[in-house]
Image (cartoon, helix red, strand yellow):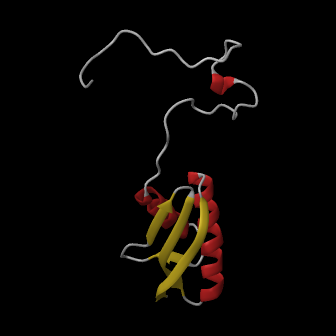
Amino acid sequence: MAGVRTSTVPRQRESPGGDPAWARPGSGGGRDPGGRTVIGHGVVEKAAARAVREVPGALPVRSRTARARVSGEVVLLRLRIGVHYPHSVREVAARVRGHVGQRIERITGKRVHHIDIEIAELVR
């Protein structure tokens, strides 16, 4: 009910031992007992664009750098990047793929299935 205030707080779910179910050893290590977390594709795209900036020799392009597709626990990424001349395009793309994949998996907890990279610019 919107706009209704109450002075009581709902009770936590408890196990037969008296501890909340999420606080028991072996029950998932401190998981929140209720609700779910949804990570939108826009969040993944911003994190991926930021991660591209962290790779030496790579830079985000002026247009949309990252496009993400999130399907359950799997992420598919398409990146458009620039490469600083005279860096090797293949080496920079491989470093970007590895770094962005690790960063997205660490930040979101989702598995990065694959990353397609388009080299859009070569910049001096």
Residue lying farthest to the front in this orientation: 16
Q: In the rendered view, does 90 fall on the left or right side of 70? A: right
Question: Vertically, is 77 above or below 102?
Answer: below
The answer to whether any part of residue 53 appears in the image is no
Q: Which residue is drawn at 61% across and 73% down?
A: 97
Residue lying farthest to the left in this orientation: 3
Question: Vertically, is 52 above or below 74?
Answer: below
The picture places residue 64, in percent across and down from the top left corner, at 38, 72
Name the image quarter holding residue 27. top right
Where does the N terminus fall, quadrant-wise?
top left
The picture places residue 57, in percent across and down from the top left corner, at 58, 79
The picture places residue 113, in percent across and down from the top left corner, at 60, 68
Q: In the rendered view, does 42 fall on the left or right side of 18? A: left
Name the image quarter holding residue 111. bottom right
Q: How many discs appear?
A: 0
Q: Residue at x 71, y 13 (%)?
A: 17
Q: Which residue is drawn at 49% across and 61% down?
A: 70
**80 vs 34, nearest the viewer:** 34
Q: Which residue is drawn at 56% across and 52% down?
A: 108
Question: Vertically, is 94 above or below 98?
Answer: below
Name the image quarter holding residue 33. top right
The answer to whether any part of residue 119 appears in the image is yes
Residue lying farthest to the right in this orientation: 26
The picture places residue 76, in percent across and down from the top left corner, at 53, 68
